[in-house]
Image: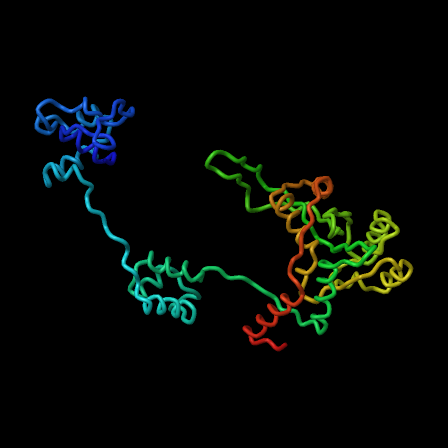
Amino acid sequence: MSQDQRIGSELAGVPHRGPGGRSPKHPRQGTLGPQRSLPGGSRRASGRSNNAIAAELGISRPTVILWRERMATYGLEGILHDATRPGRRKALAPEVIARVVEATLHTKPEGATHWSIRDMARSQGLSPATVQRIWKAHGLKPHIIQRFKLSNDARFEEKVRDIVGLYLKPPDKALVLCVDEKTRIHALDRTRPILPLRPGIPERQTHDYKRNGTTDLFAALNVLTGRVIARCLPRHTAAEFISFLKVIDRQTPRQFDLHLVVDNSSTHSTPEVTLWLAGHPRFHLHFTPTSSSWLDLVERWFAELSRRRIRRGTFTSVAELTRAIEEHIALNNAHPKPFEWHACADLILAKVAHCKEASGAEH
């Protein structure tokens, strides 16, 4: 007998039985035991109020009203058996589902760029919950948009295979370093003090801010270990890039060749940089295709730096910003965790080809 049935039995004055028809020896605290039933049968017959019965049995007043109504409507049988419940939800016809999916993929609502659940429900004569279930079953999310950029580099495939090959199968007796610059990192100070985190209330800061200068971060991520060599410099020119290459040269073992993955910034290919590289033959630069910085793993590390240390930070000066960045780098190098690259070049090129075909771009 369920808990609801036991409650109903008590309200009707019927002794409740345990499993197998036996009366429980020790009713649980808070349940309705047979000793609480009124002499002469139903408590309703005694004329007692709903509040009084609820207080005596330790249940809510709506529960008392529910079982009294069932007793009045169905008699004793109404409280000895569970009430009937609705059956399973009616299955939608396949043509209805197909119609909703087709409309979602190939039409747009009037006066809007994409469908909402309620717009589609009105259009198809269905409930919003039904549309939501259809979209979920088919992985449709009209409210989400993602952005992409296709490279027009004539040597795109060659460069992708070169860099992915470094990640998946690095050369012997060599280090692979992903090198890039995070330029113009702003030291921003809020116009009012930050309101701290409280239970039920997130940390709050003003939307406006004061600019206190910028710095440029040069970083080299060791693909194998996850450690980072970095310097904050005031400018972003070929001279600063060469000075950072010298730092890399000093802080890496001399017996290893260095394969640097870099982007197509003009500072990486000036005559001064080319001359310096000619005098340091252990340095080998591998350029990413244009509009393909996602191939450079140090960009992923920059994203972590921004998310964990810079975006919500408050800095009154460039020096304070630089100390915060250096602190993050020190913590990273104390507990390094490398990013693992899994995608092979064939998979990447196939996805890019599919994207070009879908967008109508020329190969």
Q: Where is residue 155 in the image (x, y as percent from the top left)?
A: 72, 72
How many marks on residues?
Answer: 0
Residue 15: image quadrant is top left
Q: Where is residue 145 in the image (x, y as percent from the top left)?
A: 50, 62
What residue appears at the point 89 percent right and 58 percent down from the top-left corner? 280
Q: Nearer the viewer, residue 107 or 171?
A: 171
Instruction: Please state if 250 lies on the left or on the right of 113 as rendered.
Output: right
Q: Position of residue 61 (x, y in %)?
A: 21, 31
Instruction: Please state if 129 lies on the left or on the right of 228 as rendered.
Output: left
Residue 293: image quadrant is bottom right
Q: Outermost residue toward the right?
A: 279
Q: Quadrant of the C terminus?
A: bottom right
Q: Position of residue 309 (x, y in %)?
A: 64, 43
Q: Work out whether 122 lies above or below 191.
A: below
Is any atom of residue 48 visible in this view?
yes
What residue appears at the point 71 percent right and 66 percent down from the top-left corner? 161
Instruction: Please state if 5 lies on the left or on the right of 308 as rendered.
Output: left
What residue appears at the point 40 percent right and 71 percent down from the top-left corner? 107
What residue appears at the point 65 percent right and 58 percent down from the top-left corner? 342
Residue 74: image quadrant is top left
Is any atom of residue 218 visible in this view?
no
Q: In which quarter of the image is the N terminus?
A: top left
Q: Which of 72 and 362 is in front in this view?
A: 72
Q: Outermost residue toward the front?
A: 20
Color theme of the render: rainbow
Q: Outermost residue toward the bottom?
A: 362
